[in-house]
Structure formats: C-alpha cells, structure tokens
Image: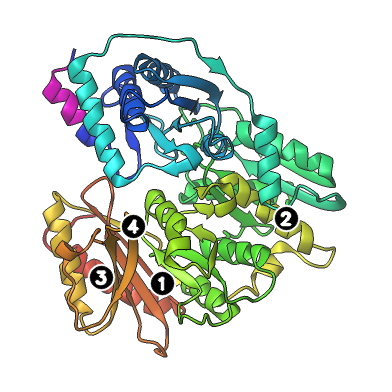
Amino acid sequence: MRSYEDFVKILGSVFKRDDVRGKWGSELDGEVAWHLGCAFVKILRPNSDAPAPRIVVGRDMREGSPEMAAQLIRGIRAAGGTVDNVSMCGSEMIYFLTGEKAGRYAGGAMVTASHNPPEYAGVKFVKSGAEPLSSDQLRKLKEKTARSYALHLQDALRGFERSDETAEFVEKLLNVSGLAGCRKQAKLKVVVEAGNGMGGVTFRPVAESLKELVQGIEFVFSDENPDGRFPVCTPNPLLDSYISMVRYRVEKEKADLGICFDGDADRAGFVDDQGNLIDASLVSIILFKMLAPRPSDDIRVMGNLNSSIRLVDFVNDHIKPPADGEKGLIMTPVGHAKIKGLMRAWPQISPNSRVLFASEHSGHYFYPDFFYADSGMTTALFMIRYALENITENTTLSGMLSSLGQECFASGEENTEFDNDNETIDKIKEVAEEYATLPWRGIVADPDMGIHKVKTFAADEPYDHTKLAALDLRVDSEPGTTPQWWFSVRKSGNEPKLRLNVESIDENKMREIRDKLLGIIRTRSGKK
C-alpha cells in the first residue's frame, strides 16, 4: 500500500489543467480511481443533507479502462452516490446524458486518456448540464481525493444500473447538426477512420441512421474495433501519421470526405476528396456558413488564441459591425474548461449577442445546443451536411474549399522542452521583449464571473506574467502590415514545455518569424 505522501505525489502528477491523466499502472490504477470516485461525490454533494447524486459513467477501450471504471464506480457508491453505467462509449455520450438529462444526473465521468498513447489512462469529469469542473473545483477534487485516501472510506457498494441511451443520443446529434429532417437522395462516400478508439462504436449508429435518411450515402469504416493498445497508430487528428492513414483511405476508396476521430471521439479531423487536410480554420468557416446563413450583428464566434488569420478575417468580414464595436470573432484561452466557462458566461457579458459555436485549433468544436460541450460527432455531421448540400456532379469538396478565405501558411505547433517552469517563464519574457513595440494578447481572470478571457494590451504595457492567469502570449502584425502574420507562445498545461505557433499569408514570412522565435526560445537553456 502506498504511503500518504506517495499518493499525494501521484495526484500532483495526474491532475492536469482540465482533467486527470497519467500512465496506467505506475500512476493511475484502480486504487486511485476508487478514491477519485469518492471525492467526486463530495464535490457534487457538498453537505450530507443534499440528495445522493446520480452519476453517469462511461469508458473507452484502453487496456486499463475496465478496471479504472469499475473502481471509480465502486468509489462513487461507497461515498453514497448512485451510478448509471453506459460502459464503452465516446465522451460525447457523457456530455449528452448530463446535458439532456440534467435533472437526473448530478454529474458524469468518462474514463479515457483521449488521444494520449496507449499506456495512458484518465478521467474527464463534468457536472449537470455537461458543465466542466472549474480550476478551483479540480483543485478541490484533488484535495478530497487525498482526504479520501487518508480516511480509507469503508466500502458501501450499491447495485448499479446499466443504461442504453444510444437512440436518444443519435437523435440529439442529428437535431443539432440540422440533419434530422434531411430526407434526400445523394451520392456521397465518406471514410471514417476510428483509429481503434471509440469512434467506431459511437459513430456507427449515427452512420446507420443517416443511411436511412439519405439514400445513396455510403460509409467506409477503418480500424473500427476498439483496442486500447492502438496497434496501428495513436488516434490523434493532429498527428501527420494519422492524417496520412485517412488520406490513403480516401484516395483508395475514391471518397468525397474523410473523417478521423481521436481516442474518445470528441475530436475529429477531416480531409477532402483529394486527401488535403481540412484544417480547423476551414472547418470553422464551414460551421459558420452552416449556422449563420445570413449576416447579422448579434452573433459571435469564439476561437482560441491560435485562431487563424483566415478564420478571423472571414468571420469579421461576414458579420455586420456590432453596435458595441466588438469584433465578431472573440478570442478565448486554450483549454476546453476555459472555453466552456466563457461560452456559458457570454449571456451575462453581452446580453444582446449570442455565440454560434467555439473552436480550437486542435480540432475541438463546442456547441451551445450541445450543452456547450465539444462534439466531434456533431462537427462530423455538419461536414457531411455541407458536402450533401454542395457537392454535385461538377463540384467537389476540394473545389469548394479552395474559395473559402485567404490561404495561410502555418508552422504547426513547435514544442520545446525545459527543465523547469521558471525557464519557460524567462523565455516567454524574452520573446515579449523582442516584440515590445507591438500590442499583445494575454489571458486574464475575471474573479467576479469565475472565468478566464483574452485581453489586448497596448504596446506600452509590458508583459508581466504575475498579472496574468496563464503564461500565454499572442502578438499580431500591425493592421495594414503586408504580409500579415501572428504568433503565439504558451506553456503546456501538463509539463515544462513551450508551444510555439506562427502563421502568415506569406510562407517566407512565416518561416522567418518561426526561425527567429525558435532561435530565442532554444538558445542556452531550451532544448528540442
């Protein structure tokens, strides 16, 4: 049995910015999961007079997930909670159930390490309404987990119920994406790469329902069977190796669209009929066209600090100038909990406008109609709907995409590891000083609303990490500068590592700024 000190040390390692993740066996195991379950009940039921919380639990296909889920459930029941176990599913099923049945479920837990390599395990926690735990609640969850371990709560297992809500889940996705009433004939071939994650299990019933609605639509699944060892490739839509698999399948099948899901299927990547990557900015523009067919001054789109020039300009050009002077594209911090918090708070921040959706450059897309949660399934359905409505005998998806927005050149995410957090702070300061003549964006906290948001600072306001809620820094070229460019540098939420992204409408300019910044970041203490 671990000492209390060793247990607390493990908790310090596995509690990340938004959820719990660690290596199965050495960090996360059934014992940790049991105490996480106990602690989660305490978060949802702060006093003993409150009713016993009902929690819905799901898991992915990883090697450790069955034991992790079983022990999590036992911990929940030991602390007085009741459980509905949906067994293997995607994260969106948990979002759906806690959102659609907010009166039934006080919270949900999805046992998954998402896109991490096969040796990892983890848990995503949400509250009723699919609301993520705040940073403060995650901190309290960690404290209560340690407290549970110290007290060694007596096992008080209750029977659990199994629920199968797949039909309702599929109906919800079809409604949100506007495909529920779509009855037509169309020739469309879609490749679905599941990567041995939850994408095959979760999207198969969606595909079957679509085949009943659309005569002529065809789905070709690849690596559909869940296998937590990920024998072919780690299912991460940001990996070139994973996208290459989709590209190969699309070309082999002569398909119109390729879709790939990450491990827990809440994130999706896409390629067109020519095998070209449809990056997050293009996907976001398509979502905008689907959700905002007419110009309006009361709509907003949220995009994180790495939002592309193409997306920013397209959204701002297609939204009537708001009376309040605010731009149509609202930048957000990176991280799903921060984005969801800002989306939920938006009606209080700007009562006269509404958020259509939010996007992250990593391929997460968030929908108010899906409980403000990220949904790769919904995004996939919007992409299918766009293809259905626009592809003809003479028009291909690749042809349509070529006309959407200004072409941009991106560096991709350049990661640099450091020995400690202090080194990362020093490097960001060096970068900020190099571009001190330009305005910059950073992340600030709004303690009254309990949210984080992006603030633009004037050039004469120096970068000071002690006044920020996160180390993130974004700098854009001056308006009217040619060629246009921007960069962001931020610290990883999990380790002492800096992540650099650079983009410009000119490839040479992008390379110039990227190389300059990497020279600063990787000089002396930095290392590749």
- The residue labelled by disc 4 is 449
- Which of the pair 265/515 is nearer the observer? 265
- The residue labelled by disc 1 is 503
- The residue labelled by disc 3 is 517
Label 4 with label 2: CB-CB less than 8 Å: no
**Dot 4: within a 10 Å radius of its alpha carbon, few (fewer than 14), some, or many (20 or more) residues?**
few
Q: Residue at x 24, y 28 (%)?
A: 144
Specify which label sits upstream in the sequence, 1 or 3: 1
Judge whether 133 appears above or below 526 on screen: above
Q: Amino acid at mark 1?
A: Glu
Label 3 with label 2: CB-CB less than 8 Å: no
Closer to the camera: disc 4 or disc 1? 4
Closer to the camera: disc 3 or disc 4? 4
Q: CA distance from mark 4 to mark 1?
A: 32 Å
- The residue labelled by disc 2 is 385
Asked which secondary structure carries label 4, the reply is: loop
Quadrant that contains the N terminus: top left
